[in-house]
Amino acid sequence: MEAAGGDTDTTKENMNEEAGGIEDESTEESEDEEEEEPKLKYERISGDLREILKRDGASCIAANSKLMIIGTNWGRVHVMDHQGNKVKEFAPHSGPVTMIDMDMNGDYIASCSHDRKVSIQGLYTSDNSHMLTMDVPVRCVALDPFYFKPRSGRRFIVGDIKITLYEKALFGQLRSTVLSEGGGPARAMRWRGQFLAWATDSGVRVMDMNNKTVITLIKRDHSLALPCEQYPPHLCWQDDLTLLVGWGDSIKVCRVRERSTPPQHMTQTGLDLPPFYVEIVYLFTTDFYVCGLGPLEQHVAVLAYNKQETSGSSGTDWRRPQMRVLEPLQGTYQEISKDVLGIRCFQEYKPANYHLECLVEERQFYIVCPQDVVLAKPRDADDRVQWLLQHNRYSEALEVVKNCRDVQKYNYVSVGRMYLEHLMGQGSYQEAVQLCTQILGTDKALWEEAVVRFNRVRQLRVLSPALPLGEGVRLDPTVYQTVLLDLLQNDHQVFLQIVQHWPGNLYNVAFIINAVLETLARNTNNLVLLQALAHLYSNIDKHDKALAIYLKLKHKDVFSLIARHNLYACVAKHIVDLMSLDVDTALDVCCQHINIIQPDSVVRSLEMHTEFLYKYLNALYERNRDLSCKYHSRLVTLYADLDRSKLLPLLLTSSSYDLSQALEVCRARCLTTETIHLLDRMGDSVESLRLILEEEHDIQWAINLCKEHDDHDLWNHLINYTIDKPGAAKNVLSDLTNNFVLLLSMPSKFPNLTILSQLMKIMQPKNFFGRFHFFEKCQIVTDNVNLVFHLLNGNNSGITHYGDDIACVKPTLRGHKRKLPRKNLGVFRPQYWFSCMPEDFKKIIVCLAGIEKILFLMI
C-alpha cells in the first residue's frame, strides 16, 4: 500500500503511478497563513490491484473489516485484502458491474450489472448461490445483513424499475415479492438492520423490513437540472437508525424514530401509520457536488467535486476531488478540514465516476475511480506528529509525544533532537539551550554531542550556563575545559560567571589558571580576568593569592572569601584595604571575630589612618565596652576631633581615660561644656561654676551645680554673681527656700524692690513656717536662738528703700514724725508705716513682723 498523502485546504497530493512508483505532478501549492492540520490520511491501494487497473477500470466497491471487493467495467469481481492482494476472482457479468454488496459476515457477495444479471456468490461455499437474469439493466442489489445465517430466509433485494424482494422458499426455490414500484429506476440502495433505504428519481424511501412497510419518503429537493445519471444519490447508514443522504449539492442527516403512540391505538382512531417515522435532523446545501459520504465521529466526511472552476486554479486542477470533513448545523455547516486529492486521471472524471465506501466501525473510507483506489482514514498520534514536524511545528509535536501514549514511531528525545536541529539552523540559540535542558536529561553522550554542535557554530557561551554540573550526569573534564577555553578567548565576562558557578572538581583548575595567566600577560589590566583568577586560586586553596587579587581589584567578594575559607587571621594585616573597600562590612568582621582579630593588632595597623581608627574604636566601644576600655583615652581625642556629640557621653560614663589628658584635649579645642564636666569631676567646682557663669551663661546649670555640691561658698559665688542681675536673682531665690542662712542674708544683698518682692513671696508665714519646722525635729536650739537675735537686729534697724512712691510723712500709728523726702532713704521701725507707702512694701514689713512672732513662739 503506497502513501497517498492529503494535506489541508489547498494541499494537493499526486497519486499518479509512473515507472513503478509514485511521482508528483507539476502542480502549484498555495499555502494559507496558518495551515490547519488535516483530519484524514491517505494511502493508495497497490498490490495486485495496480495491475488490474492498468487493463481494467474499477466501477464499484464493497468492503468490510477483512476484505475488499472490487467490481470492474469488464464485469469482473475481485476479492482482495486491504493491501490490494487478490484473494479470489469471479467473472459473473459481461458488462460493467453497477453495485456490489456483502452480508454482515462477509461470506456472500451480491453483484449486479448492466447485462441484467444479478449474482449471489458464496466465498467459501456454493450453497445458496444464485444467478438471476432480469428484464432490464440492474443498478442496485442488497443482501440481507444476516444472509449467512441458515434461518434468515436468505433474502436479497434487486432494484431496477421496481424493488423486488427475493427469499428462499421450499425446495431451494426463490420466492419474489415486489416491495415498491414507480418513481423511476432505483439508483442507490442500503440495507442495515431492519431498515432498507433506496433512492429513485423522486426521492429516498425507507422501509421497515419486518413488516415490509415504507415508513417515509424523503423527496428530492435539489435542482432538477442535475441529472441523476451524472449526479447520482449516495446513501450511508451511520448506525441502525441514522441515515446519511447526499445527492447533488444537498446533504441530509436523518434519524429513524419510533412513534410515541402505539399502532393499535392509531388503528382504532382510523389512522394507519407505521410504528416508525424518519426525522430530518440536519439539512443543508453545499458549494460542491457530493460524490459519496460517511460518518466520522460527530462529523460527516464527504467526497466532494467542485461545482465550477475556482479562481486561482490553473488548467483542470479544479476537477480534483476533495475529502471534506463537515460539522452539520441547522441549515448550514462548518468545514473542519478539506484535503485536495491527487487521483489518477482526475481530469477525465465527473461526479458519477467517483464512489465512496465507508467502514463505519473502522472509520475508514475507500475512494474509488476507474483508475485508482485510495484508502482514507483518521490520522493517529504518529500521523499528527509527522504532520507537525513537516510543517515545522516542533513545539506542538514535542507536546504530543510527551502527553500522548499512543505515539509509537516517535519518542521525546528523537522529536526533541529534530527540534534542536531546526532551532540551530534558524540561529535561535537561546531557545535551543532551553530545549537541551528539557530533552537531554541525564544522557552524557547527548550532552557532549550538543557541546560539539554549539562549538561548531561558536555559541558555547550560550550553552555553558545550562551544562550539567555532576548532579545526575557529569561530562568528561575535557568538555568543560573546552567550554572554558572558548569563553576565555571570546567572552571574558561569561568566563568569569562560569568560573564562579562551576565547582572546581569538574575540570583541571591548574590548566585553566595557566591559560588565564597567559592571557593576562598580554593584558595585565584586565580586571575581569583578575577576578576570575582569584576565584580559580581559591578553588585550589591558594587563598592568600586570591585575597591579594581581590584587594587589588577592590572587589567585595573578598569578604565572602574570608568567611568561606576562615581567613580571619589575615584581616588585621589588610584592615586598611578592607575598610577602604567596605567600612561597615570590615567592622562587622572585626567585631564578630574579635577573639581572632585582636584589637591591638588592628589599632597598630590603623595608627596612620585616623578616620578608620576612629570608626574601629567607636564600633568596638559600642559593641564591646569592656574590651574598649584601654582605648578610651585615644577615643577621647578622636571624638573631640571627629564626632563631638559622642565625647560628653564618654566623659560622663567612662572611668578608663586619663582626666588630665582629657582636660588638656578639651581646653585645647575650646570645648567648654566638656571642660566644665571634667573640672567638676576633678574637684575644681569653683572653676566649673565660673566657666558656667562666664562662658556658658547658664544660671540653671550653675544652680544645679550648687545644689549638687551643697556648698555655701559656691552659693555665695553664685549670689555675688547675680546681685546686679534681677532675672538671675529670681531663679536663685526660687531654689534657696531650703537654705535658711542664705535666705536671711538676701535682703541685705538685694536692695532692689523687685528682689524683695520675690523674697516676700517665699517668706510668707504659711510657707515659711513649714520651711523652718525642721528645726524642732533637729533640736538645734542654739542655732534657733542665734537666728532669732539676728532677725531682731535686722528688724530694729532701718530698711532702705529707693523709689518715687514714698511722699507722705504722716504716720498712721504711734511713732516719731519724720519727714521722708522723695528719692531719699526712708528709715522706720516695723511698728510705723505711712498711709501712702506702696502696698508691696507694706506686705514685706508685715511678713517680717510675722517672722519675728513665729521665731519667738519657736523659742
Image: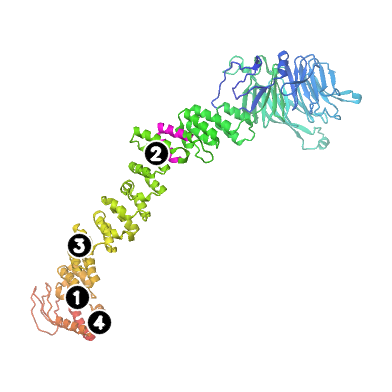
**Mark identifier at residue 696:** 3
Disc 2 versus disc 4: nearer the observer: 2
**Mark identifier at residue 532:** 2
Between discs 2 and 4, the one toward the N terminus:
2
Examine the image and state in which quarter residue 592 appears: bottom left
Horizontal relation, residue 496 to residue 368: left or right: left
Colour theme: rainbow
Q: Position of residue 814 (x, y in %)?
A: 13, 85
Give the position of the C terminus as an image quadrant. Answer: bottom left
Instruction: Identify the residue under disc 1.
Output: 742
Q: Which amino acid does label 1 sit on?
A: Leu
Examine the image and state in which quarter residue 12 appears: top right
**Mark identifier at residue 775:** 4
Label 1–label 2 contact, CB within 8 A: no
Q: Main secondary structure of the magenta part?
A: helix
Between discs 4 and 1, the one toward the N terminus:
1
Q: What residue type is labelled 2?
A: Ala
Q: Where is residue 677 in the image (x, y as percent from the top left)?
A: 23, 64
Between discs 3 and 2, the one toward the N terminus:
2
352, 296: nearer the viewer: 296
The stretch in magenta equals 479-503
**Mark identifier at residue 189:** none
User: Under tag 2, what secondary structure?
Assistant: helix
